[in-house]
Each structure stands twice: as C-alpha cells, then as structure tokens.
Image: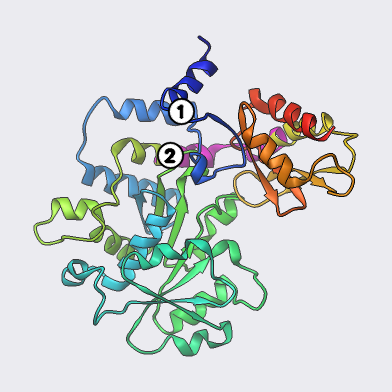
Amino acid sequence: MSATAAARGVFEQLGARPIINARGNNTVLGGSTPSARVHQAMLDSEQYYVDMQQLLERSGVVIAELLGAEAAYVTPGAAAALTLGTAACITRGDPDKVAQLPDTRGLKDTVLIQTGHRYHYERAVTVSGAHLREVAPSELAASLGGDKIACVLYPAHLEGAPGTLSLDETIRVAHAANVPVLVDAAGRIYPIELFKSYPRRGADLIAFGAKYLGALNASGILCGRKELVDAAVHNGFIAFETSDWEKSFGRPLKVDRQTIVAVVTALQEWLETDHDARIAGYERRLDAMASELRGAPGVSLSIQKADGPGPRVLRVDIDAGSARQNVQQVVDGLWTGTPAIAVGRDGDRAVLVNPVTLRPDDDGVVASRLGQLLL
C-alpha cells in the first residue's frame, strides 16, 4: 500500500472523507501539516515525560526572545490566547478574581471594540465572562474612563478598515487611560517584520495561531507584557493543577508536551525560512496549474497576493454568463468529487486556490479537476 493510500485509509476506516486542501490553514479542514522537523520534534518529545510547568515556562522564554516580547505562553489556539488574554486583563493576577471568573460581578469586565472591527472570532473574549462593547472610533478615548474597562480588543487583520483608528493610535489612546490593548494577530505571521512588530509597537498582549507556522491546528501563542502574560498563566490549566489556591476557569484550555515542542520548533523553522524562495516556489506551482486552465471560456486567471502565510493564491475569475459553470457549481463539483477538494472563493466572482496546505503531488489533481469543470 502506498503512503498516500495509507493516509486516506486512516480517515476512511472511520467513515470520514480525506480531502485535498487547497483552501489554506482552515480550522475545519485540520489546520496545518507539520513539517518533518516539527513532526520529529513531537516524536522525540514522546520518549520522556516532563514537568509541564517548567516546559511552559522555558518554552515561553524561548518564544518571547524570538518574537521580541517580554513573555510568552503556549495556548491551544489563537482563540484560547484571546480568552486567557482577556482574563488576564480582568484579574491582573489577583487569586480571588481568578477564582471568581467567569462571574465578573464587581470586576473590570468590559472589552471595547471599534465600530468597523466587529468580527466572527470576537466571541473568544467573552468566554472569560467579559462583556464586549462596541464604540465609535471617535468615541474610544471618552469610553476608556471609569472602573469597568478591562482592555481594548484590536483585530489586526482589520487594521485600515474605513473610519477606524490605526493600531498605533489605538495603543496611544488606550495607554493614556492606562488600559491595555489585546491584539488578535492570529494569522499575521508574514512578512516577518510585521509578525515581530506588535510588541515593539506597544501592544500589551498579542494572540497568534501557531497552525499558520506549521504547528498543530489547536496551538497558539499569547505574548506581550510579562505582567499580563503571567496573569494569563494564572488563569490557565497549569496554575489550576499546581497551585493550592488558584482554581481557574481555564482548566479546559490544556496543551500537551507535543504541542508545546511543536510550537517552538515551528516558530524557529518559520523564522529561519528563506521566504523569498518559499513564495517563488508557490508562484511556480500556481503558474503551472494556471497553464492547465488557459483557454477555458468565461475564465480569467491571475496569481494574486494575499495576506497571511500563503501570500499567493491562484484566482480563477468566472463569468457566470459565459463560463461552463458558475463559482458555486465549481466549488460543489470539487467538494463532492473523488477525491474531495476544498478551495476558497471570493463570493460569486472567483475560485481561489491556496498552495500553502496543498501537497505538490496534488497540484495536478486540482488543476485536472478544475479543467474538467471549466474547459
């Protein structure tokens, strides 16, 4: 049996369909594929047990140094980092407040977010018991007074949204009122200068998704000011287990030793990667796929710059009036076929092929299936 057939069999014996992922680091598709180096580090970590508190502390030191932050903590995903980061801003290391969450009566439990910054994953901050309050950008400064504001949530991918304050201005305004800023930078890991910029710009806490680095789907990083990262740790699983007095709500947010080692290794590998070569490789692969589709009626092809770790995608624009199939039909045809193929889309305008989670051996399969639907 080939390695590919064996890999499919792992899912098929459970009654689940294996999928070729041309959509990217998508949580519902499994997130990421660890590199050989990351996979080996995980295997090595299974040979011995470890003091998890010490491993979390030491890995945090390494991660913080690599990112230019005061401190860091490995979490089970970026959403968990937002949850623990919010709890840190509410409790500030006070054991009585830690024990009280998610009951926030009498605590600083309000998280501000600008109009224009509302987004799907904001739900993560309210898991701690916090209350999210939307304010107009022009009213942010005036809204920071009083004794209820825990922090300001800033989704980094929405920086530049019309009418909103920049991250730098938000930090300036919030810090003038002694209020911390929690940045959701889940996938903002490239360019490297951007990835490492948030602590330098003054963000108090930053949440990253480590799946984008090539660690596991359920892995993330919370980094920033030591005082607040330490407060997040007090709300997490290890403090619950190792302290006689801290019984935090964050006990379910557990990570294992393999995950911690994978995050550190993936981060080191990401920072050592020749990203110009990586991007050039993606462009060659996408151009080869595009060449298989040229001449399809009602279709225009382009290699488009995109945000995140996969900075190039193949954009297949489809004119529903002259193409053989519209976007929905193409997406459905790829998904329901054998093997199933997941792609991205830009509404009803285009299909997007992301190579970052696509095995090179599957490039031809994706191009061929697109060709069957469009040529």
Give the residue at the far top of this rendering: 1
Question: Which residue appears at 40% of the width and 45% of the height?
Answer: 219
Residue 360 sits in quarter: top right
The foreground one among 156 and 289 is 289
Judge left or right: residue 97 versus residue 126: left
Q: Residue furthest left?
A: 244
Q: Which range of residues does the magenta coloring cover?
A: 264-281
Secondary structure at badge 1 equals helix
The quarter of the picture where residue 251 lies is bottom left
| Magenta stretch contains residue 364 | no
Secondary structure, magenta segment, majority class: helix
Q: Is residue 109 visible?
A: yes
- Check disc 2 and report the residue beneath it: 216
Question: Rounded to the nearest whole Å, what is the CA distance between mark 2 and mark 1?
Answer: 13 Å
**Measuring 43% from the left and 64% from the top, which residue is drawn there?**
123
From this view, report whether residue 296 is shown above or below residue 128: above
- Residue 230 position within the rendered picture, expressed as x and y whole percent measured from the top left: 28, 61
Residue 37 marker:
1
Q: How many marks?
A: 2
Asked if residue 277 can be seen in this view, the reply is: no
Q: Quadrant of residue 164?
A: bottom right
